Amino acid sequence: MCAVLGVAGLACLSGSVAAGCHTTPGGMLGGGTASSAAPSSTSAVPKPPSDPAEAVPGIAVTLPDRIPPNALVCLPPRPGDGRAASAEVSDPGAPKITISMPDGWNSSAGTGDTALMLIGPDGMSATVTIAATELEPGGSFLRYTANLGGSMPRLKFSVAGAQFCGYSSELLTMTIQGPAGAIDLADRIAHIWTNSKQYLVAIHLEGPAGAAGFGAAKSRLMQDFGIVIP
């Protein structure tokens, strides 16, 4: 049922990018809610990552179809890949997802578009948001990326296509300069179509640059996740 496609497409750029400031609940620095993989590209010239002329990696052709109630359209992470954590919002038409939570982390339900909030060691934290969007995959990904990190200068940034289960998806990795030091960010975003609407799901991880365990937490949280369509 669940076909996992390899990570394809990579675009990197460095330099400070001023974007509209957006802060998610709990002080998280998440982005805004909002074929085939694109060829890789590299540029040393600072420019906004939301440049519409740039190719958007991770876009899959998703053909609308009638989905039966409570359909498991993508299998959850395998047992042994961390503790399973369910995330859902009050919107009855929104997809419900199951992620893998790192050992030693705690979770609590969020409000609004924030489905789940997670707290880890060494100043690390994460959120899961599920928000309706009127944009197609490329547009919703560009909007989210443009808002990621708010107005803080970007020290490093990369984006890779990460299609899975036939859905468009990207993996974003970034380091920004915060007031008290550098901050590492990682985001897994996916565009999910349902019988009534389309949604942008975002798993956002952040922590002090160089925090012990950040790499392990990223590996757990950024992997493919389970999806149930109500």
Image (cartoon, helix red, strand yellow):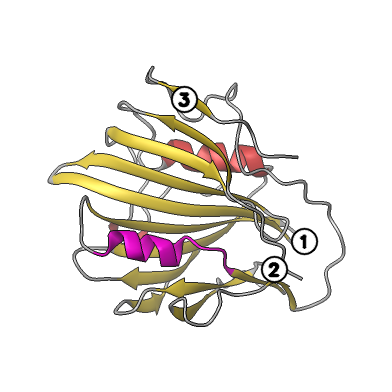
Could you tell me what secondary structure mostly forms the magenta stretch? helix
Q: Which mark is residue 196?
A: 1
Residue positioned 72% across, 63% down in the render: 3
In which quadrant of the rendered image does the C terminus lie? bottom right
- Of all residues shown, which one is farthest toward the top? 45
Which of the 4 image quarters holds residue 83?
bottom left
Q: Residue furthest left?
A: 180
Crowd around label 3: few <14 · some 14–19 · many ≥20 (10 Å): few
Question: Residue 88: percent from the left, percent from the top?
Answer: 55, 73
Residue wearing tag 3: 42
- Considering every residue shown, the one lying at the far right of the view is 66
Three-letter amino acid code at disc 1?
A: Ser
Asked whether residue 149 appears in the rendered view, the answer is no
Seen in the image, is 119 located left or right of residue 72? left
**SS under mark 2:** loop
Measured along the vertical axis of the image, is residue 157 above or below residue 128?
above
Q: Which of the two residues, 37 or 207, is positioned nearer the viewer here?
A: 37
Check disc 2 and give the amino acid type: Gly
Q: Earlier in the sequence, mark 3 or mark 2?
A: 3
Q: Are marks 2 and 1 in contact (CB under 8 Å)?
A: yes
Q: Nearer the viewer, residue 230 or 206?
A: 206
Circle nearer the N terminus (1, 3): 3
> Measured from the top left, where is residue 55 in percent x and y?
61, 29
Tag shown at residue 11: none
